[in-house]
Amino acid sequence: MDLKEIQNLIKFVAKSGASEVKLETGDIKITIRTGHGESTKQTIVQQIPMGAMQQTPAPQQVQNDASQNSPEATKEEKKEDNFITIKSPIIGTFYRKPSPDKPLFVEVGDTIKEGDVLCTIEAMKLFNEIESEVSGKIVKVLIDDATPVEFDQPLFLVDPS
């Protein structure tokens, strides 16, 4: 290996961004170190909250705002004020069934009592059964099956009467 080849190798390593290259051929051993390894590289990791990924598009939100001004929307809001919201106690994946081949834990219209299992939430490969803290009738399921949920995210609306 002549001097010209070594210089070309040094230029190549510098352009590649590698911090160190070792080359052994026969009786020649070459180690090339660049300044890249000595400089501290700062990596910025931005975490996106799960709720931000699940937000509805802006046009749909505009439609919802417009519909809330109608008399029907205000009547529905007053009805929902009487309902109890069951929220997620943990972060994980929401499941309405204990397993894919089993029936749903609860459906809209089912009467539940305190302690009944409503769903499971998988967190770190553990399936946590979520039990009802109230008695009443399931009015609405607010989350689709196999959907990620956040802490304190509404899951069910229950009519306590």
Image: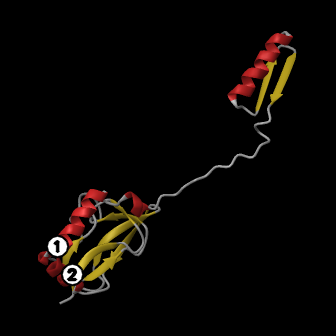
Residue 60 badge = none
Pointer 2 residue: 80
Q: Position of residue 131 (x, y in %)?
A: 33, 79
Q: Pointers 2 and 1 in contact (CB under 8 A)? A: no
| Callout 1 crowding tier (Cα within 10 Å): few <14, some 14–19, many ≥20 | few
Side (left or right) of 138 relative to 25: left
Q: Secondary structure at mark 2?
A: helix
The residue under label 2 is which amino acid type? Glu
Q: Residue at 84% of width from left, 22% of height from top?
A: 30
In which quadrant of the rendered view does residue 112 lie?
bottom left
- The residue sitting at 70% across, 46% down in the picture is 41
Residue 154 in view here: yes
Where residue 158 sits: x, y (%)? 23, 81
Residue 25 in view, yes or no: no
Quarter of the image containing the C terminus?
Answer: bottom left
Taking depth in this image into account, of 90 and 48 the one nearest to the observer is 48
The residue at the point 81 percent across, 19 percent down is: 24
